[in-house]
Image (cartoon, rainbow, N blue to C red):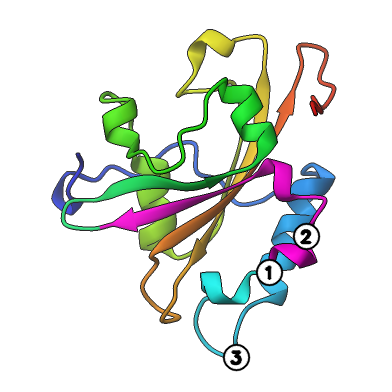
Amino acid sequence: MVQMAERIPSPISLPIPEDCHAKVKAGHEYWLSKHPESGLPGRQHIDPVDIPELLPNIWLIDVARNPYRFKFRLLGTQVVNYAGEDNTGRWFDERWPDYDPSVFIDVVESRRPTWARGRSKMRPEKDYYEMERVRFPLASDGENVDMILALTVFFDSKGQEIIQG
């Protein structure tokens, strides 16, 4: 578990590019549309009915602090299919004791979305996949990030989106 004093910013947390995948762009536009007048949107602002086309690619992560820990709250079907297992309710550090939480901590501390595209860091055995992933901060009180809304698009070795189901 990483505590704040040990934190090193992740080199793979990037701003969302203009040429991102259409689902990533739609997720970003949705998140922006849910911003209250001040502060961040919270889980209470997110309605799955608004984004049915994104639900298979969505996952929600609960944030615990002191020390930072992250738990899978919800996983879309594409995420479960990719992982080959449903980790809902499991802590990241219990499932993957050596995982690096810095990408999640970046979202919590910066209170900004982060984006990445590349091979899986948590599932290196899936080396024939590439992923495009975005993480959005959610704060039930508008200030303190207590959840991360993530969206992942999976690609095959030819760069085509993988759609299972």
Q: Is residue 48 magenta?
A: yes
Within 10 Å of disc 2 (Cα), the crowding (few <14, some 14-19, many 20+) is few
Q: Which mark is residue 47?
A: 1
Residue 41, visible in the rendered structure: no
Amino acid at circle 3:
Glu
In whole angstroms, how far apart are the C-alphas of marks 1 and 3? 18 Å
Which of labels 1 and 3 is toward the front?
A: 1
The reply to whether the magenta stretch includes residue 159 is no
The mark that comes first in sequence, 3 or 2, is 3
Q: Quadrant of residue 149?
A: bottom right
The reply to whether discs 1 and 2 touch (Cβ–Cβ < 8 Å) is yes
Residue 14 on image: x %, y %: 56, 46
Residue 84 seen in this snapshot: yes
The magenta segment is 47-64
Reading the image, the residue beneath label 3 is 37
User: Which residue is drawn at the image coordinates 46% and 40% (left, top)?
Assistant: 88
Q: Quadrant of the N terminus?
A: top left
CA–CA distance between discs 1 and 2?
7 Å
Instruction: Using the image as rendered, state which of residue 146 and residue 131 is in the foreground.
Output: 146
Query: Quadrant location of residue 29?
Result: bottom right
Give the residue pinned by disc 2: 51
Coordinates of residue 39 in the picture (x, y in percent): 49, 82
Taking depth in this image into account, of 100 and 54 the one nearest to the observer is 54
Horizontal side, residue 89 vs residue 127: left or right: left
